[in-house]
Amino acid sequence: MFKLPGRRITVIEPIQQDFQVRYRYTVHFTREVFAGSNPLFSQVAAGDHDYLPKKLLAVVDQGVHRHHPRLVGQIEAYCRRHQERLTLAAPPLLLPGGETAKNDSRLVDRLHQAIRDAGLCRHSFIVAVGGGAVIDLAGYAAATAHRGLRLLRVPTTVLAQADAAIGVKNGINAYHQKNFLGTFAPPWAVINDAAFLPTLSRRDWLGGVAEAVKVALIKDPAFFSFLEANIAQLTARSLETMEQVVYRCAALHLDHIAGGGDPFECGSSRPLDFGHWAAHKLEQLSGHRLRHGEAVALGMALDATYSYLAGFLLRPDWLRIMTLLENLGFSLYAPELDDPARVLEGLQEFREHLGGRLTIMLLWAIGQGLEVHEIDPQSMAAGMGLLKKRAAAGAAATASIRPRAWRNPGLPACALPD
């Protein structure tokens, strides 16, 4: 503190604080995680064992419970068997799953009340067992109770195991926007149990593969080729093949979180959300008739088509992308695309959600993304029309469509890939 010469103004120097917090969590892979003979869950929960059993509140997706009616009893029996490390503070809480559950804020209140009634503290665990929606919902409640309880995720769908449950985000929908309320709070750990996957419906089994296609398109051309080569195994529900897909997809996502330089999304770029600006809007416009993976597949098809029409993506790559998605069983058209203006509202919502300058991930090649800051509405609408034409008359109907320029020379230099 000092006074300026000849003046009575007192200047107070600011105090700057700079500190770093290191995060570490592990994604585990197993089968039958709640079998009494499998020690993994107890070892993960008691990672910093202080000779007092860890208190747990388990939250179980009702959809998972329907397919695994013995699950609640298995969790209770597991905690009794490992009571020197684990204490179940209350009976497992069943919550509805699916994206619509994230629209009901009363479920967050119900979870907060359960946490309060169970007497949980910051050293206690919320164990979320279910699909991505329940994982998101439980994570948001855990992060906002006592300013943060420990979250142990046990995702039970392909989409959640490969993508939704392995990152640092939690959230619910509000004000007609996806994940409007949420937190950045890394989990204590993630346990991927492949034994949950065989009971998934065909839609949910393949829906999760959309996220694998996404990360392959922007990061790993070899993984994309693997998906192409294993279409038959994936559509035939080979668990061993799906385990490979989940593992590689999870590894690529975690590598980006650690090495992308922006794990808490402070900037305006979000590469892992390729195809998602449209997917989120299409989910909303369809009243969640479209599930997340299906909407992501459609969003990727749209952005890949726009990349092709704009002259960024070469035709052979565009055709490979469209063919893979179609052969996996995804519909690349939905009636919501007949109203381009409504769909394009998703661009503004996407920008508002992330903040800063509009940044959209497009494609320069399979395995190589391309960030742009402007989208031409007419070209995007043309892409929607092309998807409709292809869906109605087949791939042959799009054979004569050509981009407006090859390797678009008008591409800003700042957007050129390395």
Image (spheres, rainbow, N blue to C red):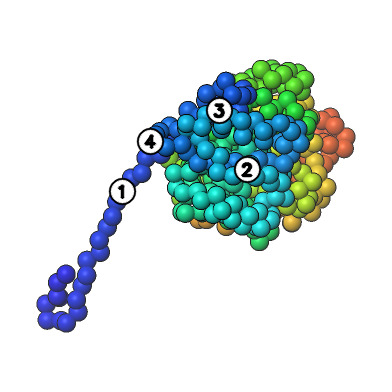
Could you say which quadrant of the image residue 135 lies in?
top right
Q: CA distance from mark 4 to mark 2?
A: 24 Å
Asked whether the residues under the numbered discs 2 and 1 touch, taking CB atoms below 8 Å apart as contact, a structural biologist would say no
The three-letter code of the residue at mark 1 reads Phe
Mark carried by residue 81: 3
Q: Which residue is mark 4?
A: 50
**Which one is closest to the eye, mark 1 or mark 4?**
4
Left or right: 307 with respect to 122? right
Q: Position of residue 330 (x, y in %)?
A: 77, 33
Q: Nearer the viewer, residue 381 or 413?
A: 381
Residue 293 percent across, percent down from the top left? 70, 38
Q: Residue at x 87, y 37 (%)?
A: 392
Sequence-wise, the earlier of marks 4 and 2 is: 4
Q: Nearer the viewer, mark 2 or mark 1?
A: 2
Q: In this figure, which residue is indicated by the disc labeled 2?
A: 91
User: What is the crowding at mark 1: few (fewer than 14 residues within 10 Å), some, or many (at least 20)?
Assistant: few
- The amino acid at mark 3 is Arg
- Along the viewing direction, whichever of 306 and 228 lies nearer the viewer: 228
Residue at the location (73% across, 25% down)?
Answer: 198
Amino acid under label 4?
Asp
Report the disc number at residue 19.
Answer: 1
Residue 159: mark: none
